[in-house]
Amino acid sequence: MTDWLQRLFNRLQAGWTRFQKSRRGQRVLTGVRWLFTGGVVAYLIYQLTTIGWVEVGRSLPTTPWFYILLLLMYATLPATEAVLYGKAWSISSYDLLPVLLRKRVLNNDVLGYSGEAYFYLWVKNNLGLARGRIVETIKDNVIISSVSSTSVAFLLLAVFFLTGQITLLERFLPDATSTLAGSIAVAIGVIAVGINFRRFIFSLPSSLLWLFGAGHLTRFVLNNGFQVTQWAIVIPEVGVGAWITLLALHIVINQIPFVPARGLFFLSASVEFSGPLDIPTAAVASMLLAQSLIDRALNLLTYLGTTAAEVTADEVAEDPASLPDEIR
């Protein structure tokens, strides 16, 4: 039975390879690629329409630093992963950046971890790496990124417990104290198991694991530092302590499982917390709404731009004669 399945798999794989290399196969795959791209673009446009196009003009902060910091936060994760994957695979980080930007779009606005699946297929088809090596590196990166963000989240949770601010969370999360205490216990257990069985869980060498861990921890700290700075610049009359409390709430909400629509949940919670934290309610609601709108607009532009650039590059590589004479 096993031999039969292996022979069937080999035949299917050989047939797929022939189809990919044929002219008809290339046309079909190109059509599927554009159909998928069109679907992603249409979905992003739908999201923007659902939020409300009219609200864009009403919600935009006037300080340019809001947009500068927003761009920095947008690019932090793709740039960090481009460096880490480039180091792991001895590939130019610049070449990986466009596909990692698209990965961010897919994870944030389509489906969680759909970006990793897309990234795997892109690397397999474009870089010629062994499938096992690709899967192992992506898997280790996902685990380390999650552990880094979760560690900081639970550190902030400890601050919430020690300062008595855990009561704020209880207004939005039923039985928050026991839920979060249980989450901390589970996290400690998972980390302990990960340390003791790291050789069975991780595939990358120790030097790369430490590099990935340092990279994601640095990225996480920088990104949240940018976030607090952005809020403080837009609404300068609010103290830094209030923004740090709001940031802690944001991180905690992102780490607690089974919380639907985290972005909207955080927006609602921030408006509710604005009173106890002495933050102007209208200002914080407008700022967070603008941030959500711009993030989705950037996703749309990023996906369109990087996909069009890659298709153009592929067409030029296949037919250099398509270039204008002055460029060739």
Image (spheres, rainbow, N blue to C red):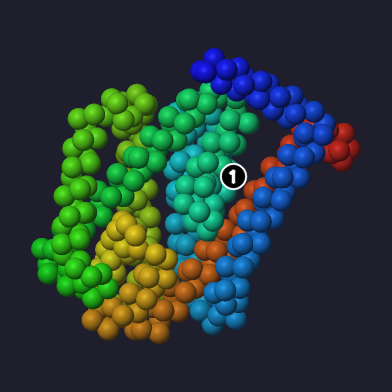
- Is 271 placed left or right of 69 in the picture? left
- Residue 93 image point, x, y percent: 53, 36
Looking at the image, which residue is at 37% across and 70% down?
265
Q: Is residue 45 or residue 235 the one in the foreground?
A: 45
Asked if 201 appears above or below 187 in the picture, the reply is above
Q: Quadrant of the C terminus?
A: top right
Identity, as a three-letter code, of the amino acid under mark 1: Pro
Query: Could you tell me which residue is drawn at 30 percent across and 45 percent down?
Result: 148
- The secondary structure type at the circle numbered 1 is helix
Image: 61 above or below 68: below
| Residue 51 left/right relative to 244 | right
Q: Can residue 241 be seen at all in this image of the molecule?
A: no
Q: Judge by depth and name the residue closer to the eye, 29 or 16.
A: 16
- Residue at (54%, 15%) from the top-left corner? 3
Q: Residue at x 82, y 31 (%)?
A: 23
In this orientation, which residue lies closer to the viewer: 159 or 67?
A: 159
Q: Residue 210, can we see it?
A: yes
Please identify the quarter of the rendering in which residue 16 is found.
Answer: top right
The residue carrying mark 1 is: 98
Q: Nearer the viewer, residue 98 or 185?
A: 185
As displayed, is residue 305 above or below residue 14? below
